[in-house]
Image: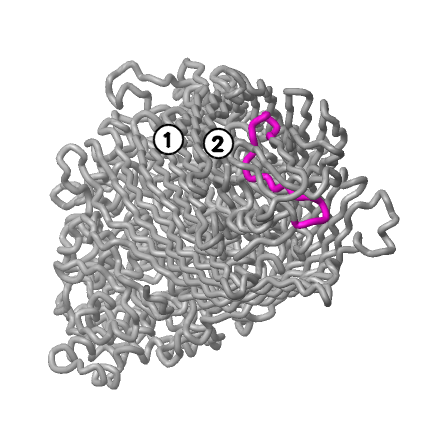
């Protein structure tokens, strides 16, 4: 019999061969996107991308969302999982497993995108005989990979700041990447986005789910709006310019606010860049499965959300409730609180019935039909990573912060556009004088709560750590208190400090 | 059945001894006689020799012999393998009636080592033999349990009380972290696959313990290095029973009937206690959820269970072809309702010899079919947590009549499921077939009888299938139709070995040489097809239909090996072995590894200066050093290779209207290579007072380097976050002592005592590619409660799986204060950084004690085992030990009695309060037998036995059972207490 030791896997494809066949390119690109949605090669769980801890909990979107929301006034969670409570109590350390999972996901995306970019250089494409229309398509794919890498590096910049820096120039293996700093990483992301904006498919012209020029412009807007935080240098003018590009691209506000978060939200012309999910074909215990199940508990009826049961975890604090003079939703329909059996005050974070619940993401369509997964586990609902309303508010904020190239009148128009939708008429419209920076922060919470913007917003407004603004259980006390200012950055996880001792921990953290 | 052990080589050795022929020319006195065994039956094939001459013969089929000697003086020596050799003075007699007595020690004289056998006196490594006489008695379903508690340095922990379930075997604590720590198991010369077989509770349980003749356990590197890359965790060589040449047909039938009972259950509150607690502390809503029943859920899920085990074997020799054929049928119910294990086995072995005994063949076949009903073990956890104030049945017909937690008629997915419904409404069945066969040919060259060539072709195959049916009305079944999920698997392990062995005695220079050189190739293939999850009524797939691409794995090992044994003056013995191993798990550059070992033994007892020490009968010093390897990293078959894998259909991604099954670049380490363990062993074998007290003491030190550990790679550098690579070191040192004492030995009464003890100290000495003193280690040891919570760590300077906890602060009364922990790092706040490394699950010291008393026809034996300083995380206390259990909306969970002690409101999962010393002393086995001797006209031997297993356990541990390999106690399938009665009939 054959006694050779030169054997290869029967079903996996050896990397040296995979790029020979152009048919493989799109499935590889699909993985770069899927990295935000699912946790591995088997749904909802199995053959995980990264290891350590619970697979579902390690989901990119789930942890990104938690880092942006549980650390703020927008969300508390009732689960006594490991060091999860530390997110809300704001006393996380470098051994926090949730922050580590997010960090690992970010760098997993960086590594995957690097691999694709490395294998699709012009030289390699030509070497493999990819030409004609395939070549053009391959270049679009490559531009999207660079956008996705920029997106994840932006998460790294925003959350962890001074991180290891790896590009397609590095080979896969075991080495110790150099640490970059926020200013340099900002420049890199900016240059990448500026470089790929022309290579990407024109705005609104790509297949659903794939990034286009507008996605890159939105990310540039976000980058510039927060530039002062990241680098100390304001770039509000640039923020206005790129917001304007997005606005001019032809996106329109969804008529019904609620429809943005339902199982058929892929039809919305407001969503600029989604992370897509499907009850049967894109399944995970993180992502939208988490966002639809975790907020349901108490007296909420799971069937109303198109699911088989709630996970009784997420609620909000009174700070958010108090942004709405009428919390019933009859005036401003964005007041989507569930109050039956819930208390406004939170004495015990671990009791679901304390704190109002929020009804936002649901696995039912705008026509009231349950999603495709009969069991009610996994929703069809897509996650609106970037949407027009956010761009409107960023435009207005950049104008208010003194950026040039925009106008106050336009800003007011955009903001009132959102309010008209919310109030079903002009009753909620504001005047020029009411359009102030504090108003913007509040309006962002009303419009965008639970869409993973809050932490970044509070930091930009200087309200994240200090005691000028507190919420229940901020700092681990019921009435809330300020915490150390270094917490605007998360720590580099101790696991990476070990794997790569050349890294230095962010200021303030012990290790 | 002592004569059956020893393997081919033992048989060959016997034949060599018995090849005396009677002189052609008959003169002098003719002596006639009959040799019988202990039962008075004629014993064929007994060698009869006139002492000091080469005159001899052997007995015929009836045990008769006839020998012509020059005069009727002198002494006859009568010998037969497995029996005590007897000398009989002729003293003028011409007829002799001799009865030979079985000698259990004879067996010990031959030790089966890798690729051959050795005389025990020549062995230089740490090797221990346990033969069938010494096996654990009682209801033993799986082979390794035959030697539980019998061998120093070998820890066998049954994984659960489920029927047919396997054990975790650790020889000297294992040597690896993430690579397997299981020893290599070799059955009749075929290294077997140690992975699980789908549809079977445990792959080893497919070997019928009744067919096993002996275990040889190779512990140190000098003994195991011949198995090179698979030898780091020790080797267990199992030899099955065989027929012997010249043996007349004997039939053995044994039947054993057992009752398994539930020894004890987890302490939780009963209905009344629970009502009182909720009424005292709960809010109005929680009180309103209370029911009026007193249901003991554990009582509902367990039962007394019956087991029948019947075995029939026929052995003998036909036309000088020794054979043994056995069939076995086991039907074992588990104490968890619905669980059942049914096994049918067939064993055949033939050991013919040809060409004037120059060619011997050893043909073995072992086949088994098992049918298992796997009870839903989720019921065990559900039963401890389920509200005791609720009834088993709701009184309505919905949900199959079972009470379930519902709201507005909808099952609450967060609440536990009615434990009995988990058992009765889910049907998990598997059928597995396994057969293991080999043909071993051993040829002694005609022109050079010192040289033997040995060819061994073997295969180990299994095919299995099973399915899980879930009732339509089982509440957690969201499909609301009867669902079926199926699986199947085919495994194949093919072996080809060839070696040459040269043995020569150089009397002039008082030397003996035994040299072996060989080649081995082995391939492992496993394939499992992909099935759709289906509606069992319509056959239609439910949910996303899979792509039906099977999962497939394959790896190959190729090896060259050699061993040289040199014995000088029967006293100084030197053994050198080397193995050169290649594995497909590594790249061409790292594929091959060299694993050498060297050992020296000095039989001090033979030295002149000790010859006069009468009390001393035997003394041997052994010293060995060797390097062994490890490549078994489980499911990672191509860890070195850059490759892409396809996602299944439920993890696709949508572009436009099309969903793409994604292609993922897999993480890899192109430089990954062998893990190496260097072992030093020094041992002393001794015997005192005519070997009435024998024993050995061994010290060992193992240093594993290039550990195949799964470590975190620097972020962004590889295509995953954690990867198998060669990193780190681990040290294991220990001391083993084994003592056997023949306290009383006379014709009426014998009393033997065996004691073994092992001290082990293991710690990780390095775990990262780069030196980092601050490295906190890796989280391991997932617990129940919360999501993704871990309680243990791999940390440098500590034993693997050391607990990582907060230091609990206690009040003046000694009660733990909820949520109050020591500020161990002194930074003024209590944060996760205050968790510290505290205790470990592995015992510092393990003890085995066994004793056997024979009095007349009665015999009584016992096995007692103990573990000391093994610690357990009481996850039942931590998860059920807080009033948080009834703080969930719309349902209540029961609490542990421990709540009444701590008064905790919220679960304190990481408190060291829950780390308990679980030292124990367990009476594993008491067995009583009565031998009726020969009845029915002396034709039938009859023996009756009565046995109790898991008799009692002495421990301070508060949980159900202190013996847990993982150190985390949550929902162990309780190990039953088993009462057995058996009969053994010999024809």
In the picture provided, is A40 more to the left or to the right than B581? left
Q: Chain of mark 2?
A: B
- Find out whether the residues at labels 1 and 2 contact each other: C-beta distance under 8 Å: no
Q: Chain of mark 1?
A: B
Q: Quadrant of the N terminus of chain B?
A: top right
Q: Is residue A387 above or below residue A303?
A: below
Residue at 64 percent of width and 37 percent of height: B30
In the picture provided, is B809 more to the left or to the right than A448? right
Give the labeled residue for mark 1.
B342
Question: Dot 2, how many residues are within 10 Å of its Cα: few (below 14), some (14-19), or many (20+)?
Answer: some
In x, y percent, where is residue A234?
Answer: 38, 75
Residue at 68 percent of width and 30 percent of height: B851
In x, y percent, where is residue B494?
Answer: 37, 56
Q: Give the label on residue B231, or none.
A: none
Distance from disc 1 to disc 2, alpha carbons, whole Å, reads 15 Å
Q: Which residues are magenta?
A: B36-54
Q: Is residue B398 above or below residue B486?
A: above
Q: Which of B161/A32 is in front?
A: B161
The answer to whether residue B452 shows anywhere in this view is yes
Q: Quadrant of residue B749?
A: top right
Q: Is residue B490 above or below residue B446?
A: above
Q: Secondary structure at mark 1?
A: strand
Q: Are marks 1 and 2 on the same chain?
A: yes
Q: Secondary structure at mark 2?
A: loop
Residue at 36 percent of width and 78 percent of height: A188
Q: Give the label on residue B161, or none.
A: 2
């Amino acid at each position: 019999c054959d006694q050779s030791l030169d054997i290869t896997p029967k079903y996996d494809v050896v990397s040296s061969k995979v790029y020979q066949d152009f048919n493989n390119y799109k499935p590889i690109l699909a993985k770069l996107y899927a990295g935000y949605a699912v946790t591995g090669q088997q749904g909802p769980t199995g053959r995980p991308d990264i290891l350590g801890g619970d697979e579902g909990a390690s989901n990119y979107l789930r942890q990104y969302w938690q880092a942006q929301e549980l650390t703020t006034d927008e969300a508390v969670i009732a689960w006594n999982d490991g060091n999860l409570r530390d997110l809300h109590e704001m006393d996380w350390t470098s051994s926090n497993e949730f922050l580590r999972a997010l960090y690992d996901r970010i760098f997993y995306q960086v590594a995957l995108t690097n691999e694709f970019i490395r294998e699709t250089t012009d030289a390699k494409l030509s070497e493999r005989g990819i030409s004609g229309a395939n070549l053009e398509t391959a270049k679009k794919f490559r531009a999207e990979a660079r956008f996705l890498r920029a997106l994840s590096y932006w998460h790294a910049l925003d959350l962890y700041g001074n991180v290891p820096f790896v590009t397609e120039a590095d080979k896969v293996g075991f080495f110790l990447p150099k640490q970059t700093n926020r200013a340099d990483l900002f420049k890199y992301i900016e240059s990448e986005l500026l470089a790929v904006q022309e290579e990407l498919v024109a705005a609104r012209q790509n297949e659903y789910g794939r990034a286009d020029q507008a996605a890159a412009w939105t990310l540039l807007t976000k980058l510039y709006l927060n530039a002062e935080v990241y680098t100390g240098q304001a770039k509000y003018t640039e923020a206005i310019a790129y917001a304007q590009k997005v606005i001019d691209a032809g996106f329109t506000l969804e008529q019904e606010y609620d429809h943005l978060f339902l199982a058929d939200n892929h039809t919305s012309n407001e969503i600029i860049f989604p992370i897509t999910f499907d009850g049967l074909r894109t399944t995970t215990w993180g992502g939208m499965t988490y966002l639809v199940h975790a907020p349901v508990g108490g007296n909420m009826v799971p069937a109303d959300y198109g699911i088989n049961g709630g996970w009784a975890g997420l609620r909000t604090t009174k700070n958010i409730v108090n942004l709405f003079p009428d919390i019933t939703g009859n005036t401003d329909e964005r007041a989507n609180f569930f109050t039956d059996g819930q208390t406004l005050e939170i004495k015990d974070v671990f009791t679901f019935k304390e704190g109002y619940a929020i009804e936002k993401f649901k696995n039912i369509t705008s026509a009231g039909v349950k999603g495709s997964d009969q069991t009610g586990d996994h929703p069809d609902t897509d996650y609106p990573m970037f949407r027009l309303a956010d761009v409107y508010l960023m435009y207005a904020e950049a104008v208010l912060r003194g950026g040039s190239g925009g106008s106050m009148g336009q800003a007011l128009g955009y903001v009132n556009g959102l309010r008209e939708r919310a109030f079903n008429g002009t009753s909620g419209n504001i005047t020029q004088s009411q359009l102030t920076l504090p108003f913007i922060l509040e309006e962002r919470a009303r419009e965008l709560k639970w869409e993973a913007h809050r932490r970044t917003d509070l930091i930009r407004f200087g309200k994240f750590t200090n005691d000028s603004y507190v919420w229940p259980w901020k700092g681990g006390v019921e009435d809330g208190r300020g915490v150390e200012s270094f917490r605007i950055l998360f720590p580099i996880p101790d696991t990476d400090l070990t794997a790569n001792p050349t890294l230095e921990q962010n200021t303030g953290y012990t290790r | 059945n002592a004569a059956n052990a020893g393997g081919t080589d033992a048989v060959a050795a016997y034949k060599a001894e018995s090849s005396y022929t009677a002189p052609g020319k008959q003169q002098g006195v003719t002596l006639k006689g009959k040799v019988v065994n202990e039962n008075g039956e004629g014993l064929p094939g007994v060698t009869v020799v006139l002492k000091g001459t080469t005159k001899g013969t052997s007995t015929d089929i009836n045990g008769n012999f006839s020998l012509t000697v020059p005069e009727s003086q002198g002494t006859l020596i009568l010998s037969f393998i497995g029996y005590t050799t007897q000398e009989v003075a002729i003293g003028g007699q011409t007829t002799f009636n001799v009865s030979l007595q079985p000698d259990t020690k004879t067996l010990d004289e031959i030790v089966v080592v890798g690729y051959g056998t050795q005389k025990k006196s020549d062995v230089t490594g740490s090797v221990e033999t346990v033969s069938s006489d010494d096996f654990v008695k009682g209801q033993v379903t799986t082979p390794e349990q035959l030697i539980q508690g019998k061998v120093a340095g070998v820890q066998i922990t049954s994984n659960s009380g489920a029927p047919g379930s396997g054990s975790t075997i650790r020889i000297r604590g294992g040597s690896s972290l993430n690579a397997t720590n299981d020893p290599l198991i070799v059955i009749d010369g075929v290294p077997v696959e140690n992975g699980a077989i789908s549809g079977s509770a445990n792959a080893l349980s497919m070997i019928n313990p009744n067919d096993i003749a002996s275990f040889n356990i190779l512990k140190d590197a000098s003994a195991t290095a011949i198995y090179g890359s698979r030898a780091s965790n020790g080797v267990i060589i199992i030899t099955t029973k065989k027929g012997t040449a010249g043996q007349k047909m004997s039939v053995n039938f044994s039947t054993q009937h057992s009752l398994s009972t539930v020894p004890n259950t987890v302490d939780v509150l009963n209905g009344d206690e629970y009502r009182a607690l909720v009424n005292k502390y709960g809010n109005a809503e929680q009180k309103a959820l209370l029911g009026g029943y007193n249901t003991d859920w554990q009582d509902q899920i367990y039962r007394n269970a019956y087991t029948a085990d019947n075995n029939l074997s026929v052995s003998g020799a036909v036309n000088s072809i020794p054979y043994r054929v056995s069939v076995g049928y086991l039907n074992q119910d588990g104490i968890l309702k619905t669980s059942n294990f049914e096994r049918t086995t067939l064993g055949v072995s033939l050991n013919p010899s040809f060409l004037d005994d120059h060619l011997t063949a050893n043909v073995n076949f072992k086949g088994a079919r098992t049918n298992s009903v796997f009870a839903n073990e989720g019921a065990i956890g559900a039963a401890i947590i389920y509200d005791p104030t609720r009834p088993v049945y709701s009184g309505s017909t919905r949900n199959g009549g079972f009470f379930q937690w519902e709201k507005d008629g909808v099952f609450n997915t967060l609440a536990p499921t009615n434990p009995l419904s988990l058992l009765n409404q889910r049907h998990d069945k598997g059928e597995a077939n396994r057969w293991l066969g080999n043909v071993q040919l051993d040829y002694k060259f005609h022109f050079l009888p010192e040289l033997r060539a040995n060819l061994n072709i073997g295969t180990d195959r299994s095919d299995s299938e099973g399915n899980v049916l879930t009732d339509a009305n089982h509440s957690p079944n969201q499909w609301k139709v009867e669902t079926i999920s199926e699986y199947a698997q085919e495994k194949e392990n093919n072996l080809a070995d060839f070696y040459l062995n040269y043995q020569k005695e150089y009397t002039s220079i008082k030397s003996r040489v035994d040299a072996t050189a060989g080649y081995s190739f082995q391939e492992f293939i496993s394939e499992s097809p992909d099935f759709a999850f289906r509606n069992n009524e319509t056959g239609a797939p439910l949910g996303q239909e899979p792509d039906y691409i099977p999962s497939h794995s394959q790896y190959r090992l190729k090896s060259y090996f050699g061993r040289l044994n040199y014995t000088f003056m029967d006293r100084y013995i030197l053994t050198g072995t080397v193995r050169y191993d290649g594995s497909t798990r590594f790249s061409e550059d790292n594929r091959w590894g060299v694993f050498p070992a060297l050992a020296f033994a000095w039989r001090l007892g033979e030295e002149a200066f000790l010859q006069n020490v009468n009390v001393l009968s035997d003394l041997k010093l052994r010293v060995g050093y060797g390097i062994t390897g490890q490549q078994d990293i489980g499911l990672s078959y191509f860890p070195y290779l850059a490759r892409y894998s396809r996602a299944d259909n439920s993890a696709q991604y949508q572009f436009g209207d099309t969903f793409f099954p994604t292609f993922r670049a897999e993480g890899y380490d192109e430089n990954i290579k062998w893990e190496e363990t260097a072992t030093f062993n020094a041992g002393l074998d001794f015997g005192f007072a005519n070997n009435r007290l024998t024993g050995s003491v061994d010290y060992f030190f193992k240093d594993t380097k290039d550990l195949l550990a799964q470590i975190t790679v620097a972020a962004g550098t590889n295509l995953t976050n954690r990867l198998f690579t060669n990193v780190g070191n681990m040290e294991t040192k220990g001391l083993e002592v084994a003592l056997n004492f023949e306290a009383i030995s006379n014709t009426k009464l014998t009393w033997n005592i065996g004691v073994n003890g092992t001290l082990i100290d293991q710690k990780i000495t390095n775990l990262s590619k780069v030196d980092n003193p601050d490295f906190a280690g890796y989280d391991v040891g997932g617990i129940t409660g919360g999501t993704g919570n871990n309680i243990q760590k791999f940390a440098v300077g500590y034993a693997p799986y050391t607990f990582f906890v907060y230091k609990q602060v206690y009040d003046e009364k000694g009660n733990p204060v909820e949520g109050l922990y020591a500020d161990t790092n002194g930074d003024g706040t209590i944060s996760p950084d205050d968790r510290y490394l505290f205790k470990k699950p592995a015992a510092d010291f393990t003890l085995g004690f066994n004793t056997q008393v024979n009095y007349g026809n009665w015999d009584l034996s016992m096995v007692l085992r103990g573990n000391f300083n093994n610690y357990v995380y009481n996850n039942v206390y931590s998860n059920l030990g807080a009033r948080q259990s009834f703080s969930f909306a719309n349902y209540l969970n029961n609490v542990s009695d421990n709540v009444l002690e701590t008064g905790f409101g919220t679960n304190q999962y990481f408190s060291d309060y829950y780390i308990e010393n679980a030292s124990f002393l367990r009476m594993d086995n008491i067995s009583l037998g009565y031998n009726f001797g020969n009845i029915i006209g002396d034709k039938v031997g009859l023996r009756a036995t009565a046995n109790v297993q898991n008799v009692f356990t002495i421990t301070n541990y508060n949980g159900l059972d202190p013996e847990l390999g993982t150190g985390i106690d949550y929902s162990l399938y309780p190990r039953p207490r088993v009462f057995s009665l058996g009969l053994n009939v010999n024809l």
